[in-house]
Every structure is written in C-alpha cells, then in structure tokens.
Image (cartoon, rainbow, N blue to C red):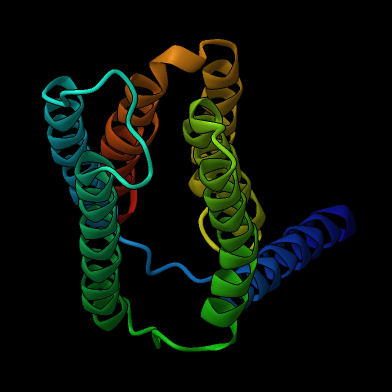
Amino acid sequence: MFFKVLNMDTQNYLQDLKEIKDLMNKSSQFISLSGLSGILAGIYALIGAVVAYYLIENHDEYYITLESSTFKLILLTAALVLVASLLTAYLCTINKAKKVGEKVWNASSRRLLINFFIPLVTGGIFAILLLKNGYYGLVAPITLLFYGLACVNASKYTLRDVRYLGITEIILGLLAVEFSGYGLYFWVLGFGICHIVYGTVMHFKYDRK
C-alpha cells in the first residue's frame, strides 16, 4: 500500500513538472506564427521568380548591370515579394493570435523579431555590398544562408519547425555556392517550394487545432 501511494505521488510530481515546463515554454515562445502565411509567401516567391526569369531571358545584353532597367525591375519584383510576404505574415499572425488568445506584441515576439532580423539585415547588407562589387553569383547563396541563419536563430523563441526550415535554407545556400550559375533555381527551392511545404506542415500541425 505504501509503495502504491508513493508511486502515485511520484507520477503526480512528474505530471506537475511537465505542466510547469509546458507553461514556461509557452511563456517564452511566440506560438502564433501562421502556416498559411508561409504557403502564401512561397507562392509570392514563385511568382516573383517567374517574373525575374522572364526579365532575364528578355534582356538584350549579355550582362545585367546595376544601372540596367532589367536589374531595377528585378529589384522591384523582389521588393514587392518581400513586402507582400511581410504584410501577409503580419495579418495572418494577428488573426491566429486572436484565436489562441495571445498578444501579437509581447516579450516573446520581441525576442523573436530581434533574433530574426539581426542575421537577416546583416545578410541583406552583405548582399548589397556583393552586388556593388560585382559578385552577382553569390547573392542568391548569401540570401539563402543568412535567411536560414535568421530562422535558426529565431527558432529558440517560437515553434521548433522554424529551425528545420532554417537548416534546409542553409543547406540550399551552401549548394548554391557550389552551383553558382543556378541561383534563381535555388531561390525557387528555398523561398518558394520550402515555404509552401513548411507552411502546409505548420497549417495542418498547428493552425487547424
């Protein structure tokens, strides 16, 4: 009888510890990321890649310079994709946060954004410097690498699945260095296909609960 009671007390103690751990994880992690926003971001990236491919194929000269209208249109396309993705992520996050009863702007989301944007902004500046100095072939790998690092860095403060997305982006970035002539295709894989797959998994794993 004594051992039975002791066993029950131990089980209750372990259950209490598990609940405390879950509560601490929830308080330190931002869980309102939306899988739908990932899917839409991937679709935007695919559309942007198609537009960029069309512009490159119809460019009259052999090289695309920073001063050319083609480059400016590609840059504009990339900017539109980025803005659309960020806006969609923001709106979807607000919607999901309301459903789960979580504030969009709290300590967890601040930590998430800070840890995400430090590598991302660094990579963006690095990519601009590469463009300025004529290292066009390294732009795609660098953006994939730093985006992957941003995801891994931010994953400590949100859903663990973001970490796996980041690792995938890093691997694609490294492969893009080896096959530097196929940067656009790696962009399609990294920012398009991976986002759609990741978003779909997130949607069915978390959003539909």
Q: In which quarter of the image is residue 54?
A: top left
- Is residue 91 shown left or right of residue 64? left
Q: In which quarter of the image is the C terminus?
A: bottom left
Above or below, 50 against 45 in this view is above
**Residue visible at 30% across and 58% down?**
82
Q: Position of residue 161 (x, y in %)?
A: 49, 44
Q: Is residue 209 visible?
A: no
The front one of 50 and 20 is: 50
Give residue 93's position: percent from left, percent from top. 30, 72
The location of residue 207, given as percent across then percent down, is 26, 57
Name which residue lies at 60% across and 59% down. 154
Q: State which quadrant residue 34 falls in.
A: bottom left
Front-lying residue, 21 or 112: 112
Relative horizontal placement of residue 45, taking residue 4 as reference (left or right): left
**Residue 34 shown left or right of residue 54 in the figure:** right
Query: Image height check: is 21 above or below 48?
Result: below
On-image quarter of the N terminus:
bottom right
Q: Give the total of numbered labels.
A: 0
Horizontal side of 97 relative to 52 (left or right) equals right
Could you tell me which residue is drawn at 59 percent across and 12 percent down?
178
Q: Is residue 5 visible?
A: yes
Viewer-side residue, 133 vs 183: 133
Residue at 27% x, 42% y: name it: 68
Report which quarter residue 48 is drawn in: top left
Which x, y percent locates residue 191?
35, 38
